[in-house]
C-alpha cells in the first residue's frame, strides 16, 4: 500500500456497532469511509477504492456476503481486504465467510482488541498481495 494511511470502508446498518468500529479505528491512522447499507457500501467502494472493507452480513440492500462475492469477482478489487462481521453464529460464520472470499471474520459481539487484531491481519494480507 503506497498510502501510509490505509482507507477502510465500514459497512454496517447497526448504528451502535458502526459507532463502536468507528471509535476504535479513529484511534489509529486510518482514513474511514462509512456506509449504512449494502448498496451504499458498493457505491462508496467504487468511488473510494478502499484498501479494506468491514462488512456486516445482515444489512439492507446487498448483504455482506453478496458484496464480498462481488468484490472478489472484480479485478479492480482483487487486492482489497475483506473483514466480515456477523451475529449469525460462529460455526456458520466459519463455514461461509471464506466461501465468499473474506480474509477474516469476527462474530458479534466482539472485543475492540479482536477487531484491531483482525484489521491488522487483513491489512498485512493486503500488503502481501500488493507486494507480490
Image (spheres, helix red, strand yellow):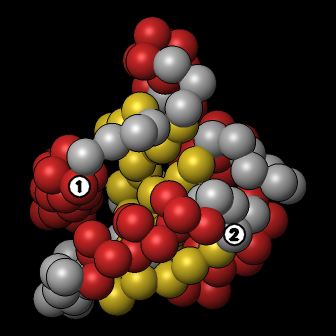
Q: Is residue 47 visible?
A: yes
| Distance in Å between CA atoms under marks 2 and 1 | 20 Å
**Which residue is at the front of the view, 121 or 58?**
58
Q: Which mark is residue 36?
A: 2
Quadrant of the rendering where the N terminus is positioned: bottom left
Q: Is residue 42 visible?
A: no
Q: Which residue is mark 1?
A: 112
Q: Residue furthest front?
A: 16
Q: Residues within 10 Å of mark 2 (few under 14, many from 20)?
A: some
Percent position of residue 62, x then y: 79, 51
Q: Residue furthest right?
A: 61
Residue at 37 percent across and 55 percent down: it is 81
Report how many numbered discs are placed on residues in the image: 2
Residue 128 occupies which quadrant of the picture? bottom left
Between marks 2 and 1 in the image, the one whose residue lies nearer the viewer: 1
**Which residue is at the front of the view, 78 or 13?**
13
Percent position of residue 75, x then y: 54, 58
On the picture, is 22 further left or further right than 13?
left
Percent position of residue 24, x then y: 27, 71
Residue at 54 percent across and 63 percent down: it is 16
- Nearest to N terminus: mark 2 or mark 1: 2
Residue 12 occupies which quadrant of the picture? bottom right
**Which residue is at the front of the view, 101 or 89?**
89
Residue at 61 percent across and 67 percent down: it is 15
Decide: is 104 above or below 76. Answer: above
Give the SS element for disc 1. helix
Quadrant of the rendering where the C terminus is positioned: bottom left
Percent position of residue 129, x then y: 23, 54
Q: Residues within 10 Å of mark 1 (few under 14, many from 20)?
A: some
Residue at 28 percent across and 74 percent down: it is 25
Give the SS element for disc 2. loop
Amino acid at each position: 500500500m503506497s498510502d501510509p494511511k490505509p482507507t477502510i470502508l465500514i459497512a454496517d446498518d447497526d448504528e451502535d456497532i458502526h459507532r463502536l468500529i468507528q471509535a476504535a479505528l479513529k484511534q489509529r491512522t486510518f482514513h474511514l469511509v462509512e456506509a449504512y447499507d449494502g448498496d451504499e457500501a458498493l457505491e462508496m467502494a467504487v468511488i473510494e477504492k478502499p484498501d479494506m472493507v468491514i462488512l456486516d452480513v445482515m444489512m439492507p440492500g446487498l448483504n455482506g456476503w453478496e458484496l464480498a462475492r462481488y468484490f472478489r469477482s472484480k479485478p479492480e478489487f482483487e487486492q482489497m481486504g475483506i473483514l466480515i462481521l456477523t451475529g449469525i453464529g460462529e460455526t456458520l460464520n466459519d463455514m461461509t465467510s471464506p466461501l465468499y472470499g473474506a480474509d477474516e471474520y469476527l462474530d458479534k459481539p466482539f472485543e475492540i482488541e479482536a477487531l484491531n487484531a483482525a484489521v491488522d491481519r487483513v491489512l498485512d494480507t493486503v500488503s502481501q498481495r500488493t507486494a507480490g
